[in-house]
Amino acid sequence: MDMEHQFTHLELFIPEETEKGSEIKGSNSYRFMCPHAGQFQCKLTNLVFKMEGKGEVMYRIVSWDTHPMDGLAHMQPIGPLYDINCIQGLVSHLYLPHCEIMYEESKVHLAVAHFTADSVELIQPLQVTNTHVIIDIQGFSLFGLLLNKMFGSSCINAQVLLFYKKMTDRGRRKKLHIHLLPMIVSVDEVANRQNDFRNITTSSKCQLIPGRKYRPKCEHKFQPQDETFDRNCGPNYHPTFEVFLEAEVEEITIGLLDKEGKEVWEPRLVVLTGNWNCGTHINFIIIPTNQRGATLEVQQSAKTFLGFQTLLSIFSW
């Protein structure tokens, strides 16, 4: 094994997030100002850049749908498609995260698609670890991880994400969205597209098989009755299931079953009360008593990160 590409002296960074240049509403672009040469891992996407020096890297997740894979019908995307830009030569190696349960014989069936203005090429990995596929890069554009379709029906590392909202109907009912997603999908990326829904943090890890049907284990009404799990890596993240709850429900026990009724995500207690989590936006409309015609709009955005909470209030008359 080539030790040059191991995760030695890996530095974790938090990128600057911006919607500038994003083709999908709520989808962020990321900016990394590298201070020096070394290996750097993005906390939000798990991308790793091997940097040759100081400089700026811009990247975002885009849709596979708008980038046809001509001549690659035997391959399937198994990760996000990244649009990466920086000065030529600044990044020497790119580490693309994956969620495959790797065996030595399966590594040879992985490849990376590199899209340029008028073509797509396959790049063979320099190395495959349990978490990343490592490639040598000469130029930048779009990069995405592919797997031969003949070997894509086994378990992958996945996650069950829960998002909750109080509905505005007269009954004050509640709705819980269940998302079945590959483990490499960023919770922050999903939360950015959920509008008024808040993420409920729970132990989300599981192993699912793409193409297989699953259903919630739950005593409350939900739809659909079952759904096929696929490798949805963005940039859109629609809920897999919707669970409808009465107003008085403050906790729910929920799990996940396969089509044979076997538990693949053990039932757990989920509490629907408490503080708002990272990425939640709460809007208040306040009418001042001394100005009947004026409206004070207060938007509070609470984001918790590394144990600290940042609270932003914007007032407009």
Image: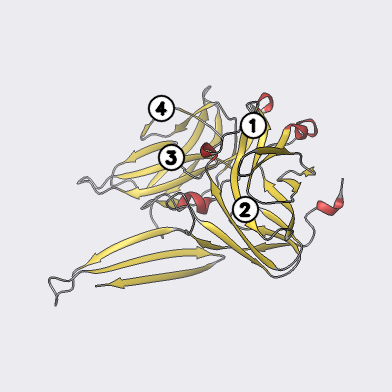
Say whether disc 2 or disc 4 marks the residue closer to the N-terminus.
2
Q: Are marks 3 and 1 in contact (CB under 8 Å)?
A: no
Question: How busy is the neighbourhood of tag 2: few (under 14 within 10 Å), some, or many (20 plus)?
Answer: some
Discs 2/3, front:
2
Question: How busy is the neighbourhood of tag 1: few (under 14 within 10 Å), some, or many (20 plus)?
Answer: some
Which secondary structure lies at badge 4?
loop
Which secondary structure lies at badge 3?
loop
Label 2 – label 4 distance at C-alpha? 39 Å
Q: Tell me the number on the disc at residue 225.
A: 4
Q: What's the amino acid at mark 2?
A: Ile
Q: Tell me the number on the disc at residue 84.
A: 2
Which secondary structure lies at badge 1?
loop
Label 4 – label 1 distance at C-alpha? 22 Å
The residue located at (41%, 58%) in the rendering is 280
The residue located at (50%, 45%) in the rendering is 235
* Relative height, residue 239 to residue 261 (above, below): below
Question: How busy is the neighbourhood of tag 4: few (under 14 within 10 Å), some, or many (20 plus)?
Answer: few
Q: Tell me the number on the disc at residue 155.
A: 1
Q: Are marks 2 and 3 in contact (CB under 8 Å)?
A: no
Which secondary structure lies at badge 2?
strand
- Residue 145: give x, y in percent of width and height: 66, 40
Say whether disc 3 or disc 4 marks the residue closer to the N-terminus.
4
Q: What's the amino acid at mark 3?
A: Pro
Say whether disc 3 or disc 1 marks the residue closer to the N-terminus.
1
Q: What's the amino acid at mark 4?
A: Gln
Say whether disc 4 or disc 1 marks the residue closer to the N-terminus.
1
Q: Which residue is mark 3?
A: 239
* Relative height, residue 279 to residue 117 (above, below): below
Q: Nearer the viewer, residue 314 or 258?
A: 314
